[in-house]
Image (cartoon, grey):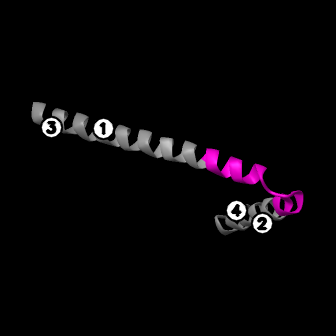
């Protein structure tokens, strides 16, 4: 029983470490995307925003 609990704790710690790594990657990606978007011309910014909104709407419709 102790071995089972120990194994579960190790697996939980591994999953937590993976989740932290993924969060760090997401945060880095947010920084990069924000920097890129700030460099866009207003027309490009609007086009990308519209495209993203359309994609999100389409995903929402598909999940219903």
| Residue at position x 70%, y 48% in the image | 35
| Residue at position x 54%, y 47% in the image | 26
Callout 2–callout 4 Cβ contact below 8 Å: no
Tell me the residue that label 2 is attached to.
Answer: 51
Tell me the residue that label 3 is attached to.
Answer: 4
Query: What is the C-alpha distance between the residues marked 2 and 3?
Result: 49 Å
Query: What is the C-alpha distance between the residues marked 2 and 4?
Result: 14 Å
The residue lying toward the viewer, choosing from 57 and 26, is 26
Residue mark closest to the camera, 1 vs 3: 1
Which portion, as a residue range, is magenta?
30-46
Tell me the residue that label 4 is attached to.
Answer: 60
Q: Where residue 25 sits in the image (x, y, percent)?
A: 50, 47
Callout 3–callout 4 Cβ contact below 8 Å: no
Magenta stretch: residue 2 in it?
no
Tell me the residue that label 1 is attached to.
Answer: 12
Query: What is the C-alpha distance between the residues marked 4 and 1?
Result: 32 Å
Query: What is the C-alpha distance between the residues marked 3 and 4?
Result: 42 Å
Relative to residue 17, is residue 45 depicted above or below? below
Q: How many numbered marks, from 0 up?
A: 4
Query: What is the C-alpha distance between the residues marked 2 and 1?
Result: 39 Å
Q: Quadrant of the C terminus?
A: bottom right
Q: Residues within 10 Å of mark 3 (few under 14, many from 20)?
A: few
Q: Secondary structure at mark 2?
A: helix
Decide which of tag 2 and tag 4 comes sooner along the chain.
2
| Residue at position x 42%, y 43% in the image | 21
In the picture provided, is 3 more to the left or to the right than 53? left
Decide which of tag 1 and tag 3 comes sooner along the chain.
3
Callout 2–callout 3 Cβ contact below 8 Å: no
């Amino acid at each position: 029983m102790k071995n089972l609990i120990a194994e579960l704790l190790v697996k939980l710690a591994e999953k937590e470490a993976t989740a932290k790594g993924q969060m760090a990657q997401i945060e880095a990606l947010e920084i990069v995307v924000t920097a890129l978007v700030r460099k866009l011309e207003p027309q490009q910014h609007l086009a990308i925003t519209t495209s993203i909104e359309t994609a999100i709407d389409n995903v929402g419709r598909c999940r219903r």
